[in-house]
Image (cartoon, rainbow, N blue to C red):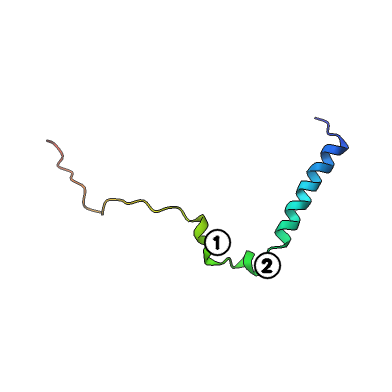
Amino acid sequence: MTSTPDDDRAALDDLRAEIDALQKIPEEELVNPSPSQLDEDAPEPTPTDAPGSEDWNDTE
């Protein structure tokens, strides 16, 4: 696959924009994120049955 200089330039511009956005984040925030950001990535809890509550004699 051959690429044109314009394609390479567009890809480099996108990469530069991403790098600039990452550089705006303070280093402390990257190393030790605030709890609000941690909660965003946390999965939603789903209810489960309590251990030992299964009815194994389900022969009816």
The residue indicated by pointer 1 is 37
Closer to the chain start, of discs 2 and 1, is 2
Residue farthest to the right, as pictured: 5
Q: Amino acid at mark 1?
A: Gln
What residue do we see at 81% from left, 42% from top?
A: 10
Q: Secondary structure at mark 1?
A: helix
Q: Which mark is residue 1?
A: none
Question: What residue did someone put label 2 on?
Answer: 27
Q: Residue furthest bottom?
A: 28
Task: Identify the image quadrant of the C terminus.
Answer: top left
- Secondary structure under tag 2 reads helix
Name which quarter of the figure residue 5 lies in: top right
Q: Is residue 9 above or below residue 47?
A: above
Residue 32 position, x and y percent, is 59, 68
Question: Residue drawn at (63%, 64%), measured in percent from left and top?
Answer: 30
Camera-near label (2 vs 1) is 1
Q: In this orientation, which residue lies closer to the viewer: 55 or 42?
A: 42
Residue 56, image x, y percentages? 18, 43
Label 2, residues with CA under 10 Å away: few <14, some 14-19, many ≥20: few
Kind of residue at disc 2: Glu
Q: Using the numbered discs, state the Cα–Cα distance from disc 2 to disc 1 in whole angstroms.
A: 15 Å
Is 57 left, or right, of 17 in this rendering? left
Q: Residues within 10 Å of mark 1 (few under 14, many from 20)?
A: few
Q: Is residue 32 left or right of residue 22?
A: left
Q: What residue is at 72 percent from the left and 62 percent from the top? A: 24
Residue 21: image location, x then y, percent: 72, 57
Image coordinates of residue 1 in percent, x first then y, are 80, 30
